[in-house]
Amino acid sequence: MRSKRGIRALTSNMNINFNLNSKHAQVTIFIIVAILIVGAILAYFFLVKPNISIPSTTGSLGIETCMKNAVQKQIPILGNQAGYNNPEFYYLLNDEKIPYICYTNQYFVPCVNQEPLLKQHFEEELKARITNEINSCYQNSLNELRQKGYTINEGTKELKVSLDLNQVVIDLNAPVVLTKDGSSKFTKFETKFDSPIYNMLMIANTIVQSESVYGDSDVNTLMLLYNDFSITSIMQEDGTKIYTIQDRESKIKFRFAIRSYALYPGYYPEQGDILQQ
């Protein structure tokens, strides 16, 4: 009996040892396989060096400078015409069309704001002036890349113009994929630069608000508040005033016409008469 029990115990111990060894062997095999896989991946990247396309939200094709130049060229032209490409309602001064942004054709009556969204209007008109030129910048850049052997897949373009405090921001949303020994993807091209035009539009809004209530605006006080700008107001024979806001550093101008609380020719009221109307 003892010998049989001893044989059983020995057999049981052998089975346990075998199972343990088997598990250790499996773990060892898994570790070796894992090392081989990692080694193969590393060897692939270091030896083959594959090209991987990494999507980009903002890119550069060398068109940013071209975009900036296009905008900087058009802002002074547009500013001289109160932000209008083709003025339709204006005062003619020395063969120049100065658009009205606050007007009444009556006497002793406050003007009505003709362009309540002045900043948004300027952005839209500026976008219209620069769209063709920026599209040319973009296409010229892509054509240069095609000549260098790139395959190009273009998406739909959308241009956005934003006037912010002390700066102009131009965003060209233009999805494009460039392929040559790999691929690169761009979705947006952006340029921004310093500009006084936003501040000038805000001053113009302040003048319009004052003219539409009081029939006048204190340009001297405004120049104390905004000493980076010179502001002038010149009265015309029919009661129209030509306002000019000029940035002292860049010399950019914003000009516009206002006719508010106009007086009859030859009538000179005493102080306070207009405000009592």
Image (cartoon, helix red, strand yellow):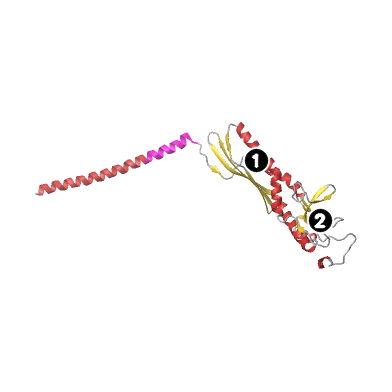
* Camera-side residue of 42 and 220: 220
Dominant secondary structure (helix, strand or loop) of the stretch shown in magenta: helix
Number of numbered discs present?
2
Q: Which mark is residue 204?
A: none
Q: Is residue 171 left or right of residue 238?
A: left
- Farthest-out residue, right: 266
Residue 229 image point, x, y percent: 76, 55
The region drawn magenta spans: 34-50
Dot 2 amino acid type: Thr
Residue 193 image point, x, y percent: 68, 48
* Camera-side residue of 177 and 42: 177
Dot 1 amino acid type: Ile
What residue sits 82% from the left and 47% below the top?
96
Q: Are marks 2 and 1 in contact (CB under 8 Å)?
A: no
The CA distance from mark 2 to mark 1 is 38 Å
Residue 190 image point, x, y percent: 63, 45
What residue sits 83% from the left and 65% below the top?
274
Residue 37 seen in the current view = yes
Instruction: Specify the quadrant of the image occupied by residue 115.
Output: bottom right
Q: Is residue 203 left or right of residue 191?
A: right
Instruction: Specify the quadrant of the image occupied by residue 137.
Output: top right
Residue 196 seen in the current view = no
Report helix, strand or loop for mark 2.
strand
Report helix, strand or loop for mark 1.
loop
Return the residue at label 2. 232
* Camera-side residue of 105 and 11: 105
| Sooner in the amino-acid sequence: mark 2 or mark 1 | 1
Residue 119 image point, x, y percent: 70, 53
Return the residue at label 1. 63
Q: Is residue 155 magenta?
A: no
Q: Is residue 45 magenta?
A: yes
